[in-house]
Image: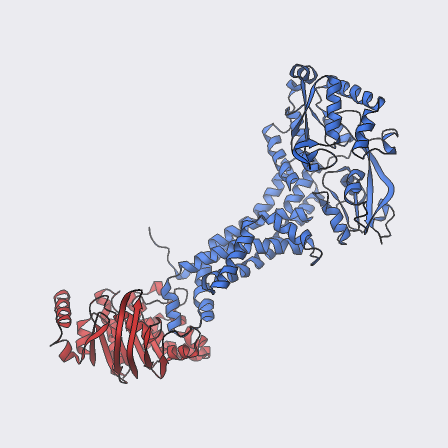
C-alpha cells in the first residue's frame, strides 16, 4: 500500500528526513513515535505531499510522488482522494456546519449529488457518534467532537489510507478516549493507517507496528510487543521510559 | 474642484462670521490705504490669461491686464498696488471680512452684486458668445431648447441659460473642458464670455468649432469695494475716468489683445435681479433626484470595486511573481493618485479613444480607485486566515480555485465586511468628486442651491440629511449581514 524509498528533506541546512525507507502493507496500523523535532510530522506530511521533499520517492495508494511536483498535478488530486488526513488542530472550516464540512469535498471534488453526499455525511456522523450534531458549527462543538467531525470529513472521500498527525494532542484527557475509540474502530475495520502519537496505550494496544523516529530516520521498527516493551535502541528506551513517567 | 472647495470654505467662513454680518469698522479704507501707502486687491490666478496669471517666462511674477489696471489706479491714488491670492468664489466674503481693500478679477457687474457691495465704473465690456460645432444649425441662444448646453459655474452665462432653460445646463469648473466636450459631441453649444471664447474656442486650432458673431448679451467687469467705503469708490471711479480719458485704459487693453469696439459703446445695462429661490417642493425634488444619482453612482462603483478588489487581492497573495508584481503596480497606481485626476483622465484624457459618458466615466473611475483600496482589505483578510484551512482543503483534494471559492473567500469576506461598510460610506461621499465631469449629484446640487438661495444653511442641512438617509440604513444593513455571517463564530472574550 505504501512504499517509501530514500526519502530526504532539508529545511535550509538542517536535514529533517535522512533517507527514510519503509513499507506498509494494506490493513496495517503504524504508530509513529519519537522525540519532538525528530521528523514524525514531516514524514507524514510528505506522504500526502503537503510538503515537498528533496530526494527519494513515495508510492502510496497507487500514486507515485517525486520531488518538485506542481500543485496542480492531477496525480496529487488522485492522491488526496485516496489518502485522508487528520490534523492536530482539527482545521474544520468554521463557516460551514459539521455536515457541510463533510459534504464539501465529495460535492466539489467528486461531484457527488447533494442528496448522496448528505446521506453519506449523516452515516459518517453516526459512525463517529455525532448523529445529532449535523447542523452544528465548529465553534459549537467540543474539541473532541470537532476532531471526530474531522475524521468523518476525511473518511467521506473513501480513502485507502488515513494519516493522523497527533490527533489527540490538542484535546483534554477526557475527550481523547472518544477520538481514540473512533480510530480503534477504523483499525479493526481494516483501514491502513499511520498515526503520529504520544499515546502509549494506543501504540501498545492498537498498532500492528511501531516506528520510533529520531533525527530524521526510523531508529526502530517492529511490533509493539518488541519496540514498546523491549526497545533495542537507546533513544527508544529513553523515550518510552519518559513517556511512562509522565503518563502516570 | 478648487471652486467647490472654495465654496465649502466660504460656508465655514460665513458661519464663523455670523452668517455674513458685515463689520462696520471696515469703513475709512481710503484714509487707511494712504497711511499705509499701499492698496491691496484680491484675485485668483487660476482664472488664467488674460486676467491675472503667472508670467510663463518668470513664474514667480504675476501679470495680466488687471495687474496693469490696478497699477494705474494705484499710481493715480498715490500708493503702491499689491495683489492678494484668494479663491475666486471666496472674493466677496473675503472683501467683506477686510482681508484686502478691493476686488479686481473679472467681477461682473450684476444687480445682485450691487446689493451686497459697491461696484466701480466698468473697466471692460465683455460679450456672451455662443459657440457651436461647424455643422450645427443653431443660430442663436433661442435655438437651444432640447439641446445640451455647457457653461461655467456661477457666471452670468449660467444665469442667462438657467433663465431660459432651467436646469438642463451642463456646468463646468475649468475654461478648457466645456469646449473639449463640445468638440466631442457631448454637448451642442457653449455659452461663455468672449474673453474665454476667444482664447479657448474661436481659434484656427479648433476647426470643428464656430463662434456665432452675435453678442448674446453684454456685461462689464468692475472693481468691487466694501459698502462702507463710498469715498474709496469715488476715488477709484475718478482714476478710471481719467485712465479712459487719457487713453491709458485703451493702451492696457490693447496690450492684452482685449480692445474692441464694445469698449467705446455706452456701458450696457445690468440684468435684472434674479430673485433668490426659496426652499420649495421643486427644490426638494431636485435634491431627491441628486441623491438618487449619488446612490446609483456609489452602488454601481462598489459593484465594480468588489470583484476588481478580489481579483487584485488574490493575484497579490497567490499569484506568480509577475502576476503579483502587476497587481501591486495596479494597486499603487490607483491608490497613489487622486481620484480626481483619474476621473479627468477617464473623461477627457482618453476621450479621443474611448468616448465615455460622464456617468460611465464616474462609475469606472470610482470603481477602479476603490477596487485598489478593497484589494488591500481583502488581502489582509486572506492573510488572517489560519494556514491550516488551506492545508485541510488541499488534503481533501480541492484545487487552488476550489479552495479559494469554498474555503478562503467566504471566510475572508466575513472578516472584510466591517471595513467594506466603512469604504462604501466613504465612497458615498467621495462620489461628490464626479461633479468635475459635469455629473450633478448631491453635493453639486447643494452648492448650486446655495448660490440660488443666497445661503448655505438650508441646502447644507438638506444635503447632510440626505447623505445620512443613505448611509445610516446601509450601515444598519451591513450590521445585520455581519451578525448573520458571524453566527458561526463567537466573539472572543477579552
**Residue at the limit of the structure toward the front, as seen here:** B57
Q: Is residue B230 visible?
A: no
Counting from the top left corner in percent of width and height, residue B244 is at: 83, 24
Counting from the top left corner in percent of width and height, residue A171 is at: 25, 65
Left or right of residue A94: residue B282:
right
A125, A160: nearer the viewer = A160
Q: Is residue B410 above or below residue B462?
A: below
For residue B1, what is the image quadrant? top right
Name the residue located 33 percent from the left edge and 52 percent from the top edge: B493
A198, B46: nearer the viewer = B46
Left or right of residue B10: residue B160:
right
B490, A48: nearer the viewer = A48
For residue B213, what is the image quadrant? top right
The colour of chain B is: blue
Name the residue located 41 percent from the left edge and 59 percent from the top edge: B383
Q: Is residue B181 above or below residue A23?
A: above
Q: Is residue A54 visible?
A: yes
The colour of chain A is: red
Name the residue located 20 percent from the left edge and 67 percent from the top edge: A35
Counting from the top left corner in percent of width and height, residue B395 is at: 37, 73
Left or right of residue B93: residue B243:
right
Q: Is residue B79 above or below residue B290?
A: above
Work out which quarter of the rendered image holds the N terminus of chain A and state it: bottom left
Work out which quarter of the rendered image holds the C terminus of chain A and state it: bottom left
Counting from the top left corner in percent of width and height, residue A233 is at: 13, 74
Amino acid at each position: 500500500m505504501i512504499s517509501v524509498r530514500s526519502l530526504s528533506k532539508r529545511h535550509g541546512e538542517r536535514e529533517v528526513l535522512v533517507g527514510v525507507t519503509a513499507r506498509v502493507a494494506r490493513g496495517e496500523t503504524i504508530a509513529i513515535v519519537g522525540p519532538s523535532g525528530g521528523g514524525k510530522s514531516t514524514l507524514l506530511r510528505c506522504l500526502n505531499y503537503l510538503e515537498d521533499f528533496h530526494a527519494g520517492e513515495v508510492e502510496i495508494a497507487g500514486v507515485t510522488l517525486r520531488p518538485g511536483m506542481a500543485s496542480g498535478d492531477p496525480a496529487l488530486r488522485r492522491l488526496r482522494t485516496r489518502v485522508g488526513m487528520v490534523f492536530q488542530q482539527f482545521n474544520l472550516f468554521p463557516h460551514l456546519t459539521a455536515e457541510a464540512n463533510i459534504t464539501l469535498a465529495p460535492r466539489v471534488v467528486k461531484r457527488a449529488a447533494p442528496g448522496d453526499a448528505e446521506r453519506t455525511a449523516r452515516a459518517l456522523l453516526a459512525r463517529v457518534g455525532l448523529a445529532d450534531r449535523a447542523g452544528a458549527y465548529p465553534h459549537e462543538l467540543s474539541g473532541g467532537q470537532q476532531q471526530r467531525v474531522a475524521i468523518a470529513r476525511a473518511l467521506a472521500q473513501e480513502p485507502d489510507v488515513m494519516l493522523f498527525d497527533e490527533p489527540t494532542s490538542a484535546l483534554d484527557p477526557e475527550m481523547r478516549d472518544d477520538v481514540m475509540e473512533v480510530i480503534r474502530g477504523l483499525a479493526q475495520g481494516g483501514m491502513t493507517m499511520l498515526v503520529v502519537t504520544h499515546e502509549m496505550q494506543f501504540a501498545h494496544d492498537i498498532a500492528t507496528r511501531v516506528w520510533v523516529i529520531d533525527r530524521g530516520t526510523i531508529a526502530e521498527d517492529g511490533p509493539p510487543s518488541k519496540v514498546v516493551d523491549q526497545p533495542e535502541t537507546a533513544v527508544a528506551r529513553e523515550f518510552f521510559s519518559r513517556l511512562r513517567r509522565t503518563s502516570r | 474642484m478648487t471652486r467647490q472647495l472654495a465654496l465649502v470654505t466660504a460656508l465655514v467662513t460665513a458661519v464663523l462670521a455670523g452668517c455674513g454680518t458685515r463689520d462696520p469698522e471696515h469703513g475709512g479704507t481710503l484714509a487707511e490705504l494712504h497711511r499705509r501707502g499701499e492698496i491691496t486687491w484680491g484675485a485668483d490666478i487660476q482664472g488664467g490669461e488674460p486676467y491675472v496669471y503667472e508670467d510663463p517666462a518668470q513664474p514667480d511674477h504675476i501679470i495680466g491686464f488687471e495687474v496693469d489696471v490696478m497699477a494705474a489706479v494705484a499710481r493715480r491714488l498715490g500708493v503702491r498696488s499689491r495683489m492678494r491670492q484668494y479663491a475666486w468664489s471666496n472674493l466677496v466674503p473675503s472683501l467683506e471680512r477686510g482681508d484686502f481693500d478691493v476686488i479686481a478679477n473679472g467681477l461682473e457687474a450684476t444687480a445682485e452684486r450691487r446689493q451686497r457691495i459697491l461696484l466701480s465704473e466698468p473697466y471692460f465690456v465683455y460679450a456672451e458668445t455662443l459657440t457651436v460645432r461647424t455643422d450645427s444649425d443653431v443660430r442663436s441662444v433661442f435655438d437651444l431648447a432640447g439641446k445640451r448646453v455647457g457653461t461655467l459655474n456661477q457666471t452670468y452665462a449660467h444665469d442667462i441659460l438657467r433663465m431660459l432653460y432651467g436646469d438642463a445646463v451642463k456646468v463646468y469648473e475649468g475654461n478648457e473642458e466645456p469646449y473639449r466636450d463640445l468638440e466631442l459631441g457631448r454637448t451642442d453649444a457653449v455659452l461663455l464670455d468672449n474673453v474665454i471664447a476667444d482664447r479657448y474656442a474661436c481659434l484656427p486650432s479648433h476647426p470643428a468649432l464656430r463662434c456665432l458673431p452675435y453678442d448674446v448679451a453684454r456685461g462689464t467687469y468692475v472693481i468691487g469695494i466694501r459698502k462702507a467705503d463710498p469715498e474709496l469708490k469715488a476715488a477709484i471711479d475718478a482714476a478710471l475716468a481719467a485712465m479712459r480719458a487719457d487713453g491709458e485704459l485703451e493702451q492696457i487693453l490693447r496690450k492684452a489683445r482685449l480692445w474692441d469696439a464694445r469698449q467705446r459703446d455706452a456701458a450696457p445695462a445690468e440684468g435684472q435681479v434674479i430673485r433668490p429661490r426659496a426652499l420649495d417642493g421643486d427644490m426638494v425634488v431636485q435634491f431627491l433626484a441628486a441623491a438618487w444619482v449619488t446612490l446609483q453612482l456609489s452602488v454601481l462603483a462598489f459593484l465594480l470595486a468588489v470583484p476588481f478588489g478580489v481579483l487584485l487581492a488574490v493575484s497579490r497573495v497567490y499569484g506568480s511573481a509577475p502576476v503579483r508584481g502587476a497587481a501591486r503596480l495596479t494597486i499603487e497606481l490607483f491608490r497613489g493618485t487622486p481620484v480626481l485626476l483619474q476621473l479627468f483622465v477617464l473623461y477627457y484624457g482618453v476621450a479621443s479613444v474611448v468616448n465615455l459618458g460622464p456617468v460611465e466615466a464616474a462609475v469606472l473611475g470610482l470603481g477602479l480607485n476603490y477596487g485598489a483600496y478593497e484589494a488591500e482589505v481583502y488581502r489582509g483578510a486572506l492573510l488572517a486566515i489560519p494556514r491550516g484551512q488551506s492545508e485541510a482543503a488541499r488534503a481533501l483534494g480541492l484545487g487552488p480555485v476550489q479552495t479559494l471559492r469554498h474555503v478562503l473567500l467566504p471566510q475572508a469576506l466575513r472578516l472584510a465586511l466591517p471595513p467594506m461598510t466603512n469604504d462604501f460610506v466613504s465612497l458615498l461621499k467621495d462620489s461628490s468628486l464626479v461633479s468635475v465631469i459635469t455629473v450633478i449629484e448631491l453635493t453639486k446640487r447643494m452648492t448650486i442651491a446655495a448660490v440660488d438661495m443666497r445661503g448655505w444653511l438650508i441646502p447644507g442641512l438638506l444635503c447632510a440629511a440626505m447623505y445620512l438617509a443613505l448611509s445610516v440604513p446601509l450601515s444598519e444593513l451591513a450590521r445585520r449581514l455581519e451578525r448573520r455571517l458571524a453566527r458561526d463564530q463567537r466573539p472572543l472574550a477579552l
